[in-house]
Image: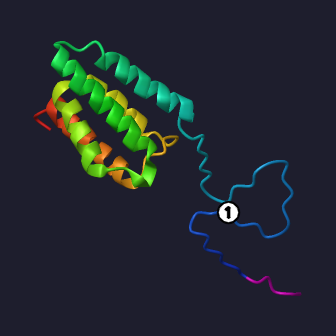
Amino acid sequence: MAQEKDTTVNTGGGAYVGGSVTTGGDFVGRDKITTTGGVPGDAVAQLFAQALALAQQQQPEDVREEVEAAVEIAQEETEAGEDADKRLLSKALDVLLERGPDILELVLNAILNPAAAAGKGAKMLANQAKSALEKRRNPQT
């Protein structure tokens, strides 16, 4: 009588198939990660439009003009992708942090959205501004 061979397979948590497999859909050997992406690109433009509409409601007039300009600069630099002027974007985000934190939140959502054309530098600056905004809102953390 033939002796059975003891086979040990270490998959690290993944699947092991000792024969053939036929599936009617996906065969997932371990972790199935599915992403659906962010909001479409036109929704990013809508976030900037909402931010600009809020900026246009700011009082007094000098604050309104400064905040409007900051939103417009943030949008332009986000759309510039890797060619963005990070110094200019940083200044715009600083203005929004000081003068319009609620508007800054909309702008950050637009910049950090996967559908946005923002480059790595712009996203890094947006994350820094997001941290500064959170610290301002929750000073004890």
Q: Residue type at mark 1?
A: Ala
Q: Residue beneath label 1, please?
A: 15
**Quick check: 63 above or below 34?**
above
The residue at the point 25 percent across, 41 percent down is 129
Q: The C terminus appears in which quarter of the rendering?
A: top left
Is residue 3 covered in magenta? Answer: yes
- Residue at the outermost right position: 1
The span shown in magenta is 1-5
| 103 shown above or below 126 | above
Q: Quadrant of residue 111?
A: top left
Residue 14 in sight in this render = yes
What residue is rendered at 21% in x and 26% in y?
66
Q: How is the image coloured?
A: rainbow
Give residue 120's quadrant in the image.
bottom left
Q: Quadrant of the N terminus?
A: bottom right
Q: Residue at x 55, y 30 (%)?
A: 42
Helix, strand or loop for the magenta stretch, by majority: loop
- Look at the numbered disc 1 and give the secondary structure of its residue: loop
- In depth, the one of 79 and 101 nearer the eye is 79
Percent x, y of residue 20:
85, 66
Q: Is residue 104 visible?
A: no
Spot occupied by residue 75 in the image (x, y as percentages of width and height): 39, 36
Q: Compared to 89, does 42 lie above or below? A: above
Residue 55 drawn in magenta:
no
